[in-house]
């Protein structure tokens, strides 16, 4: 890729995407079902490209252990490791939410209350009947009963549904309270969709939270949650994270020079430091002694996987393909 970009007579921007686990996916049964006419190299390329578009939806298809979850992952009891990782995946999916009309069965499986059979039935229902128009249509899905609906509905979003509430984390059992809240201050769902209720918190405060909660038939904490969701329908918490860095300069390790300051992404954190992706094939190492001017007991005090950091190149060993980096004295931010 680096060679092809250099040969072009125009400026081309590119993004660096972690390819860990792509080969595992490309050889899996799922990949063969999704791309029966592609060979493993093309499946891998599609997976990597999709990670840039929607990392959660793509990485969920791969066993977390295949993408490297820690220095000692093979020393841990595997049953316990699997259980913890499954819980983390479910927390991530629940925090972000899932588009009910586009989510794959693999992604839906990690939604609270849904199992593999229910997830496949949701996708099958969608294929046979078209897009879901409301969360209430979930009751038409085979084997998805009231209990499962109660657990999963708040995490399944419908951006273009009949009700704007279906595109929020407000649970259907609280729709009545949300509608009472809007009516109480002369708002309509159209105002929510058009983001014209920014003064709602002030109006609630003026009337008194406890009184408003009483009139809506919910607790104060539930009321606050409803207000937060109504203010930002369709909100994706990932929008607050650093955006992928687009590059046009650094292509290979030969382009690196000592003293260069680069924006990189932390790919792995180990006891002796952190590996940072700076846009070339080989990740660079920020040794624990180079993470900060102060004493650092463990790199996790300073950095975490996925974090964007500014680093300085302090050494390039082209023969052994090693890059040494430092964060000392480097201004934070892009």
Image (spheres, helix red, strand yellow):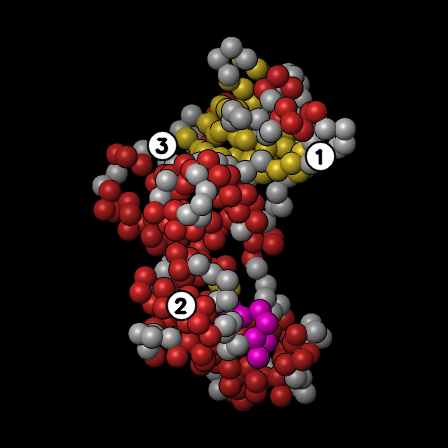
Q: Is residue 74 visible?
A: yes
Task: Answer with mark 1 or mark 3, whichever residue precedes in sequence.
Answer: 1
| Quadrant showing the N terminus | top right
Please say if the residues under marks 2 and 3 sit with CB atoms less than 8 Å apart: no
332 or 220, nearer to the observer:
332
Q: What SS does tag 2 mark? A: helix
- State the residue at coordinates (49%, 29%): 275
* The residue stretch that appears in magenta: 156-164
Horizontal side of 200 relative to 94 (left or right) equals right
- Overall secondary structure of the magenta stretch? loop
Spatial separation of the CA atoms under disc 1 and disc 3 = 36 Å
- The correct choice, above or below, for 38 with respect to 11 in the image is below
Select label 1 or label 3 by which is in front: 1
Against 21, residue 195 (above or below) is below
**Numbered label tally:** 3
Q: Which circle marks residue 12 in the picture? A: 1
Q: Quadrant of residue 63?
A: top left
In the rendered structure, does residue 157 fall within the stretch colored magenta?
yes
Image quarter hosting the C terminus: top right
18 left or right of 204 in image? left
């Amino acid at each position: 890729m680096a060679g092809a970009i250099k040969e072009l007579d125009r400026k081309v921007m590119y993004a660096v995407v972690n390819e860990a686990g792509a080969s595992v996916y490309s050889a899996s049964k799922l990949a063969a079902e999704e791309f029966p006419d592609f060979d493993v190299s093309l499946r891998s390329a599609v997976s990597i490209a999709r990670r840039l578009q929607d990392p959660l939806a793509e990485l969920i298809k791969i066993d977390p252990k295949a993408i490297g979850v820690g220095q000692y992952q093979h020393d841990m009891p595997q049953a316990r490791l699997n259980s913890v990782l499954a819980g983390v995946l479910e927390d991530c999916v629940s925090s972000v939410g899932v588009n009910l009309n586009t989510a794959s069965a693999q992604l839906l499986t990690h939604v609270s209350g849904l199992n593999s059979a229910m997830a496949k039935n949701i996708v099958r229902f969608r294929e046979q009947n078209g897009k879901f128009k409301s969360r209430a249509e979930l009751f038409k899905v085979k084997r998805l009963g009231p209990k499962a609906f109660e657990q999963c509905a708040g995490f399944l979003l419908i951006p273009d549904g009949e009700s704007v509430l279906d595109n929020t984390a407000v649970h259907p059992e609280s729709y009545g309270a949300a509608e009472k809240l809007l009516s109480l201050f002369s708002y309509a769902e159209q105002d929510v969709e058009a983001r014209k209720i920014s003064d709602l918190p002030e109006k609630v405060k003026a009337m008194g939270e406890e009184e408003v909660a009483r009139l809506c038939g919910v607790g104060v904490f539930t009321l606050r949650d409803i207000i937060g969701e109504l203010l930002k329908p369709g909100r994706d918490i990932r929008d607050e994270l650093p955006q992928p860095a687009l590059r046009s300069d650094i292509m290979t390790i030969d382009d690196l020079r000592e003293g260069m300051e680069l924006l990189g992404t932390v790919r792995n954190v180990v006891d002796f430091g952190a590996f940072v992706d700076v846009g070339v094939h080989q990740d660079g190492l920020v040794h624990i002694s180079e993470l900060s001017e102060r004493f650092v007991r463990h790199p996790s005090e300073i950095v975490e996987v996925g974090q964007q950091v500014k680093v300085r190149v302090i050494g390039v060993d082209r023969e052994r393909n090693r890059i040494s980096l430092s964060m000392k004295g480097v201004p934070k931010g892009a």
